[in-house]
Amino acid sequence: MPNAAIYIRLSEEDRDKREADSESIINQRDMLVEYARERDWDIYKVYSDEDYSGSDAARPAFNQMLADAEDGKFNVVLCKSLSRFARDVSLVETYINGLFIEWGVRFISLQDYADSAQKGSRKNIQINSLVNQWYLEDLSENIRSVMTHKKKQGQFTGAFAPYGYIKDSQNSHRLAVDPDAASVVKRIFDLYLAGYGNKAIANLLNDEGVPCPSKYRAVKGYATNRSGADAENLRWSDHTVWHITRNPNYTGTLVQCRYGKPTYKSKSVKEKPPGEWVVVEGTHEAIVSKADYDRAQAMKAGRGMHNRSPSTGGAAANVFAGLVKCKLCGRALVLSGSGKINKGTRYLRCAGRKSGIVLCNCAMVKYDALVEEMSGKIQNLIKAYCDFEHLEKHTRQSRDFGKELAPLKKAKDKNIAEQRKIDGALSDSYVDKSSGVITGEEFSVISSRLKVKKEELMKEYARLQARLETIFSLRETESKINQTIARYQNFTELNRDIVNAFVESIRIGERDRNTKDFDMEIHWRV
């Protein structure tokens, strides 16, 4: 007997549907529970996410359901509609049309008449998921247009006011000066203009016990995205000071749309070119004069000239950017110069330790040495892969894919043919009952036996399909690896493309005080 999991979701935009509308959490649950009980299915658990978008892959109940599905705790997932499960095509393909099949989990959505156990349902699910994603894209574009219009009118639309300001109590779209924090901002600019660097200013504020912006908001009881416990241990960092000294909002000019995501699905936020910013002058009281702000930017530009690559005149390239992480605190290792004493040697340092946010003992790694070491490792990997015996092994594996696929396809075709025979037999027996050739009791016995046989065939079909998709996936992975090796087998200089092709991440730990060696863990893509 099927053991069903029920998944229900209500997003932030559905706030007005929480009570009366059919989309409400209660109505979704009641409808799905009734559907399961009508079929005498056991209900393993009801998973519910509220105030989460269907494109969000980090929904807590959703991810708990996926973990339980993989553990085999149920074999059916019930949703009111496909959009409640996900509005993202990639999520639908990954789970409903991918891993669910492998895990033996059947997906049913009532409103869409989607049932992954039925023939042809996969295309129906794919079409519906595309429609749901298009809806999200249109919604995102409409919201963005409305917000941009508000910004052009000089309305502040951020969730939190910049440090040094609060939202006006009479108008939440207007900034008002927060005297205590504003005095710290003014002092930071004065120190910077006097020649202090970002790190020196951060150390000075930490030594004096001045709370950093997140801690200050928590102490004051202002809205913040950090809990009081988290904020308590935070300190000023050079990045925080750097961010404050380049924020044009302190001049009384409201500058918005400085940062954005490439698409609504993207998790990364990047700074936009100045031409795309929305700038409205004179919207609020200035903390820093325009002249002082411009002087600070000129000083930044001058200091930045000393951190340029001598060969290109541009910013120093880091082929490992974002891929090298600290094993102790999880932050990225960032590229920095060592000054004139070490003749321009560049190092990768833990961003947390470098900025003073955390006090970890992650090793400081010479950048050029890591480039040389990783070049050797990647070249050795390519050589091993191109070794004659290794190639022979992979060639043999590729032939095995074909040998394994043929009988599976044959078994799948046979299974489909047998299911059709059963459907025909069911139809014939119904006609026989209608014409009086067999009794109703005889028809019940025959149809019950045929339905049991068909259910067994459907289960076997699902197993065959899962195995086929697994083999196709393995073959595709093998093909991609071969293409990567062929493309880069003769490389002479390591670059970002090569690193991305072969390396998932590099983890750096502590350095041994006696041997001077450090712990390095490489996660390969191939």
Image (spheres, rainbow, N blue to C red):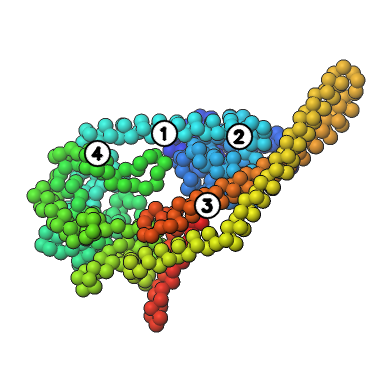
Q: Quadrant of residue 183?
A: bottom left
Apparent side of residue 109 relative to residue 148 in the rendered image (left or right) = right
Specify whether residue 285 is in view: yes
**Residue 372: which disc?**
none
Please name whichever residue, 83 or 309, is drawn nearer the observer in this view of the structure: 309
In the structure shown, which secondary structural element does the residue marked by tag 4 occupy? Answer: helix
Q: Are marks 1 and 4 in contact (CB under 8 Å)?
A: no
Q: Which mark is residue 482?
A: 3
Check disc 1 and report the residue beneath it: 137
Pick the front one: 1 or 500: 500
Query: Relative to residue 432, is residue 172 depicted above or below?
Result: below
Name the amino acid type tagged 3.
Asn
Determine crowd level at label 1: few under 14, some 14-19, many 20+ residues with C-alpha closer than 10 A.
Answer: some
Q: Nearer the viewer, mark 3 or mark 2?
A: 3
Q: Earlier in the sequence, mark 1 or mark 4?
A: 1
Q: Which residue is mark 2?
A: 122
Q: Which residue is mark 4?
A: 276
Callout 2 amino acid: Arg
Looking at the rendered structure, the secondary structure element under dot 2 is: helix
Q: Residue at coordinates 32% horizontally, 61% vertically from top-left?
A: 334
